[in-house]
């Protein structure tokens, strides 16, 4: 087996349960087809570094379930009688867009059934804590919006709130918890007593002030490329600031390997953006965002690839007609979009 074949097989194995109910287990042929869209000279190092990144940032169902099983009996959260705590807990279903909350509650149903012989539908009491469960927090805007509306319109006068997520980005946590943020403003205006704690499996550094230690796709060096220069001139309202190299690597193996992968994700994203005559302003090469070159998240979960990840990972639909922009790129992680 060649080095290329080993890397392709490794990526397919790491991400084997990605949308498994829709596509079956991810195959090496699928990974190879995606890889072959890159220039021949960089295919091997792209595969090698992506393999390294996904080994720590891919959230399989098994990995998330193990996190929730541990949390279900965490003394600092559930106390000395976990089943009593969960039986009294109130599980929120306040997500306005997407299906992640409902699907994660189904996983937690399995956890509670094994541990306590009941599910979330059997839980709830006036004295119980409130649980907001989701997979990953990115910008923090969605969870802030969901919880602000709930605090304003539905929450009781006193609330013990626990936000439970598999992953959270530092920038998203900052906006979720800042004093003049959407959620804190809603709490203040409601005059309700709300205590909030966030429980997470994974922290991801992506704050601007700590970009030297960033753990997302955030190029330190930009290639000299006419298409990239033209793109940046068109999107100069929130200009890109390079990452400072030399800090912590996070999920990346080395600074040179990271820079190569960031460059290839960026340039593939620039190519993808060129397929649409009038792309949305938030569709940026390194993932949905209104800032710079994109969000650049490295996290992919078994149930979906966030649009905050680089376009090269998820953009495209091979089932579309050849004239459609989506047919021009083959995705590694085909996305389930909001209905």
Image (cartoon, helix red, strand yellow):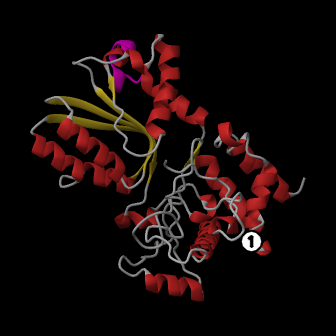
Q: How many marks?
A: 1
In this orientation, does residue 224 appear? no
Residue drawn at point x = 34 percent, y = 12 percent: 84
Residue drawn at point x = 56 percent, y = 51 percent: 305
Mark 1 crowd level (few <14, some 14–19, many ≥20, 10 Å Cα): some
Q: Is residue 84 magenta?
A: yes
Main SS, magenta region, reads helix
Q: Position of residue 282 (x, y in %)?
A: 44, 67
Q: Position of residue 55 (x, y in %)?
A: 64, 48
Residue at far right of view: 1
In this orientation, does residue 264 appear? yes
Q: Is residue 194 magenta?
A: no
Residue drawn at point x = 35 percent, y = 15 percent: 87
Q: Is residue 277 left or right of residue 323?
A: left
- Position of residue 84 relative to residue 68, above or below, is above
Q: Position of residue 277 (x, y in %)?
A: 55, 78
Q: Position of residue 129 (x, y in %)?
A: 27, 25
State which region is magenta: 73-85
Q: Is residue 326 left or right of residue 217?
A: right
- Residue 163 quadrant: top left
- Front residue of 156 and 260: 156
- Position of residue 151 relative to residue 267, above or below, is above
Which residue is denoted by mark 1 in the rendering?
42
- Position of residue 112 relative to residue 172, above or below, is above
Q: Please, what secondary structure does the residue beneath circle 1 have?
A: helix
- Residue 130 quadrant: top left
């Amino acid at each position: 087996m060649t080095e290329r074949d080993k890397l392709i097989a490794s990526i397919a194995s790491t991400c084997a349960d990605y949308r498994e109910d829709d596509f079956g287990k991810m195959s090496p042929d699928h990974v190879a087809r995606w890889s072959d869209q890159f220039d021949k000279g960089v295919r091997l190092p792209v595969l090698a570094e992506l393999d390294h990144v996904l080994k720590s940032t891919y959230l399989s169902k098994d990995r998330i379930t193990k996190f929730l099983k541990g949390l279900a009996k965490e003394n600092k959260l559930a106390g000395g009688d976990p089943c009593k705590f969960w039986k009294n807990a109130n599980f929120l279903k306040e997500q306005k867009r997407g299906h992640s909350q409902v699907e994660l509650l189904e996983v937690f149903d399995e956890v509670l059934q094994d541990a306590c012989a009941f599910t979330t539908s059997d839980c709830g009491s006036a004295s119980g804590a409130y649980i907001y469960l989701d997979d990953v927090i990115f910008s923090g805007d969605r969870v802030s919006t969901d919880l602000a509306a709930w605090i304003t319109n539905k929450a009781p006068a006193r609330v013990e709130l626990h936000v439970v997520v598999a992953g959270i980005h530092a920038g998203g946590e900052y906006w979720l918890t800042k004093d003049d943020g959407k959620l804190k403003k809603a709490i203040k205006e409601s005059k309700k007593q709300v205590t909030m704690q966030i429980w997470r499996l994974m922290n991801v550094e992506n704050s601007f002030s700590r970009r030297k230690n960033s753990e997302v796709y955030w190029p330190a060096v930009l290639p000299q490329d006419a298409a990239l220069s033209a793109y940046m001139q068109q999107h100069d309202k929130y200009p890109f600031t390079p990452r400072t190299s030399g800090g912590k690597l996070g999920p990346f193996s080395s600074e040179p390997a990271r820079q190569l992968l960031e460059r290839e994700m960026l340039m593939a994203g620039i190519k993808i953006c060129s397929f649409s005559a009038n792309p949305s302003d938030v569709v940026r090469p390194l993932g949905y965002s209104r800032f710079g070159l994109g969000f650049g998240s490295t996290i992919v979960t078994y149930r979906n690839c966030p649009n905050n990840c680089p376009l090269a990972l998820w953009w495209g639909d091979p089932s579309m007609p050849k004239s459609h922009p989506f047919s021009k790129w083959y995705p590694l992680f085909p996305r389930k979009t909001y209905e």
